[in-house]
Amino acid sequence: MLENYIDGKWKGHSTLTDVINPANGEIIAKVPLSSEKEVDEAVQAAKIAQKQWAKVPAPQRAEVLYKVGNIMKERKEELARLLTLENGKVIEEARGEVQEGIDMAFYMAGEGRRLFGQTTPAELKDKFAMSIRVPVGVVAIVTPWNFPIAIATWKSFPAIVAGNAVIWKPATETPIMAYELAKIFEEAGLPKGVLNVVFGKGSIVGEAIVQHPDIQVVSFTGSNEVGRTIASECGRQLKKVSLEMGGKNAVIVMDDADLDLAVDGIIWSAFGTSGQRCTACSRVIVHKDVQKELEKRLLEKMEQLTIGNGLDEQVKVGPIINQSSLEKIHGYVELGKREGAKLLAGGFPLTENEYKYGWFYAPTLFTNVHPNMRIAQEEIFGPVVSIISVSSLEEAIEVNNQVSYGLSSSIFTRDVNRVFKAQRDLDTGIVYVNAGTIGAEIHLPFGGTKGTGNGHRDSGVQALDVFTEWRTVYVDYSGKLQRAQIDIESN
Ligand code: UN1
């Protein structure tokens, strides 16, 4: 039974819900469904803790992150197995995700000795001007089930090293990673109240977070619909909000591409994590001259994909997170057929034998897809790919950009001119050349344009912008009153 972590204490709750292993339907834990009361308790503790934490020198705050990183490293295999149990992703990807968290710990710990500000010349004599980063105060992070530990580290580590206190609401589907990370912080010696975890539903706990007057920042990764609601409410209250809300990411395959490489890139980014990544490839925009050959090779590779329980090292595609996601995916496949797309592979849930008690969906490939079809416009968040045929690079870029999202894109070509044109014109926050659409590294900014977000970035040094304010400091050491803009002449 999992417990909330508030003010350094583990607190049980009377209302609980089941955590289910999506590979076999087994109940693996129970998680609290908390209320506004727990959110408020956490915020009150965080307010007190933050005042002290902000006074701890940043290099010392960073020491806690080094310890967190080391504990995660020691426990990497165990954490990866727990991650596969609750989320379903295959074990090698789970190890990769835990590694992302470890990398983020050491990277952000390094920021404890930087947190660079700026010095800028002042207009007046004997006057010094600088801008420094200061913590915002109490911040909230709301994290999704598809990367339950990595995304939490992208947000909580910069927040903590910068001197904030954090209220964390993890997804109820994957609370075990949150529970484990909170235990790791506790073991690493993070002072009580600096990190608080409140489990529960978005409609209650999430809503209470957004409404709480003492929370200054909300950093959210999840659906577009929820993100927009959070944004409008935070806007009304003048809270800073950072949003990452998915993608409709495309791989472009030009007529001069290394086709085998492109096929590998598509398979990995479309069917890895069963397509349940914000960065997953769900469109392939292919030059018409290589379309047939690409389809043939894709189908051959798709046949080799082993689907099953992610704990089996041989399995390449794990389950879908839950029944409602499975139904949504299947709904889109039915819609694609009605819209006139041609189904080349998959298109059905797997329900027999070993698949009986879990939620599995066959890797699915559509062709003859028109860019305006809903399957080519809306995020499906499952193993479903649409092939769209084009005649030129310009058309490929136009089709890529014709969606409301702008997270990730990729191009396979051997032509350096096309590479540079594409990286300039593809309207996404992340562009890959000769690689699939997934695999962002933690020391670079992660986020997207248009409906993917609102201009902020997770991870990278840019994450600090979400969790700090810029303070401008002028020190006048002239010993007299110097009036800016007025006394300039007398300098
Ligand atoms: C996500 O899907 O929300 O770039 C995160 C990637 C991973 C992170 C994905 N490193 O695919």
Image: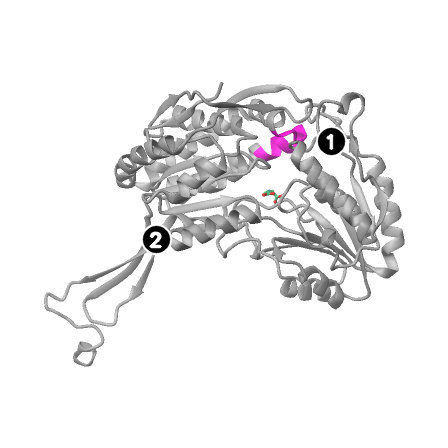
Query: Is residue 264 at least partly visible in the picture?
Result: no
Looking at the picture, the colour scheme in use is one colour
Residue 122 occupies which quadrant of the picture? Answer: bottom left
- Residue at coordinates 71% horizontally, 41% vertically from top-left? 329
Mark 2–mark 1 CB contact (< 8 Å): no
Is residue 20 depicted above or below 62 in this figure? above
- Compared with residue 268, is residue 410 higher up or lower down, i.e. above or below? below
Query: Which amino acid type corresponds to the residue marked 1 in the rendered image?
Result: Phe
Q: Nearer the viewer, mark 2 or mark 1?
A: 1
Q: Quadrant of residue 287?
A: bottom right
User: Dot 1, crowdedness within 10 Å: few (<14), some or many (≥20)?
Assistant: many
Any magenta on residue 100?
no
Q: Ligand 1 is in which quadrant of the figure?
A: top right
Q: Which residue is mark 1?
A: 360
Magenta residues, start to end: 87-97
| Residue 153 circle label | none
Coordinates of residue 349 in the picture (x, y in percent): 77, 33
Please give the name of the residue rendered at 67% of the width and 32% of the height, measured from the top-left corner.
Answer: 323
- Estimate the x, y position of residue 158 in percent, counting from the top left: 42, 43
Give the farthest residue toward the bottom. Answer: 489
| Residue toward you, 440 or 34 | 34
Q: CA distance from mark 2 to mark 1?
A: 45 Å
How many other residues sit within 10 Å of disc 2, few (<14), some (14-19) or many (≥20)? some
Q: Does residue 252 sit above or below 384 in this rendering? A: below
Q: Nearer the viewer, residue 51 or 346?
A: 346
Residue position marked by numbered label 2 in the rendering: 469
How far from the left and from the top, in percent, is residue 351? 78, 27
Q: Earlier in the sequence, mark 2 or mark 1?
A: 1
Kind of residue indicated by mark 2? Glu
